[in-house]
Amino acid sequence: MDKLRVLVVDDEPGMRLSIQKALRRFTLSLPELEEAVEFDTELAETGEEAVQKIRENRPDILMLDYKLPGMSGLDVLDRVRVEESEMVTIMITAYASIDIAITAIKQGAFDFIAKPFTPKELEKTVAKAAHSLILARQVRRLAEEKRQVRFQFISVLGHELKSPLNAVEGYLDQIRSRILGESVTAYEDAIARCLVRIGGMRKLIADLLDLTRIESGQKKRELCAADLAALADESIETIMPEAERKGIRIRLETERPFLIHADPAEIRMVLNNLFSNAVKYNREDGKVDVRLDRKGAEVRIIVRDTGIGISQAEAARLFQEFVRIKNENTRHIEGSGLGLTILEKITKLYGGEITVESRPGAGSTFTVILKDNPEGRP
């Protein structure tokens, strides 16, 4: 439970003590902001005393009498420069004229309450001030978090693009300098490497767009009766050229047809990421076993490979954005670090989960569980 500090400034002892007593037993619930608030009150008799206490330890809410001996309430507002702090000020006045209210608000007051007032009127006024204060704090916190996320995103993106851009620049500089001679064929390897790097950057941009659409809810979903087995065949066909270059065998075990209520484009992304990783991080002449099965409303996609594997500590970081496991076995493997993040977010759209079992040198097994809704099929 949050606790807000309230400084009550009034030259009438009875008024100060009455407010303190009322706020001591007042607890404010703000379910829409997921907050509950208590109030800790401190008292001051004069404007001069109030200024000193505010400067020493600025309160969250200032309840300030307009008419004080010596320095007035408006003088206090001017002295402590309310506009430069989070402090919310409620003016207390026995002279509740429109002119006074306008002047107080111009000098930074949030609200005012006219004497005499009841405990309920006090609670209502303080509740409004507390709500405004907490809401403003949450807005500032979210804005700061947004700035931090944007900074981290741009930093990581810049880092991910810097390496392939430097590589392409180096290869192009070789070609321009004719460092290998005048024959075009001498530069075929450099051109091929440029194309690989450019393809990696294109994949990163495509993954970023997919991730942004999913997280923002702007991706239009087209749910229908989809054949999971046929979609798996398509994904295997897509990855087969790379698998054949490494001598990797892919085996699919499934019923046919295997109908689920899903968006085919989303399922393709899941399968493509699973199969691509199983081949990419596999050993030469390895194998990938894929099994699709169903248990009640749950559909399981199990992909087992004979690849390099990862440790438990590495597996715990696997689904974070831009995370790629980097060690002696993976340094040469290109990737955006977003594929498994996208996979996990799509899995959650189906009320499912993804798990990984792996050991270094012993391969990995990814299991994706999706909740099917047979009644939702067209």
Image: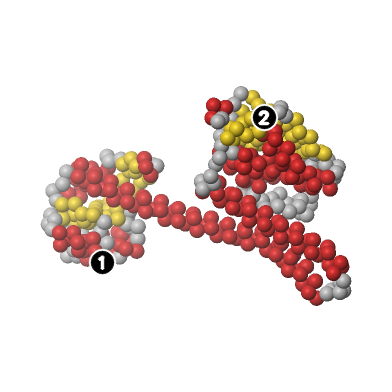
Amino acid carrying mark 2 in the image: Phe
Reply above or below: 290 against 321: above
Which residue is at a point 84% across and 48% down the rendered structure image?
245
In this view, the residue in front, 182 or 378, is 378
In the image, 319: left or right of 80?
right
Q: Which class describes the residues within 10 Å of circle 2: few (<14), some (14-19), or many (20+)? A: some
In the image, 234: left or right of 78?
right
Which residue is at a point 67% across and 29% down the rendered structure image?
258
Question: Residue 207 placed where, x, y %?
Answer: 63, 51
Q: Residue furthest bottom?
A: 177
Secondary element at tag 2 = loop
Image quadrant assignment for residue 273? top right
Residue holding disc 1 = 78
Tell me the quarter of the image containing the N terminus: top left
- Specify whether residue 344 is in view: no
Question: Residue 150 placed where, x, y %?
Answer: 53, 58
Residue 255's disc number: none
Reply above or below: 309 against 60: above
- The tag earlier along the polypeptide, 2 or 1, is 1
Amino acid carrying mark 1 in the image: Asp
In this view, the residue in front, 179 or 322, is 179
Residue holding disc 2 = 258
In the image, 299: left or right of 14?
right
Which residue is at a point 36% across and 50% down the rendered structure image?
134
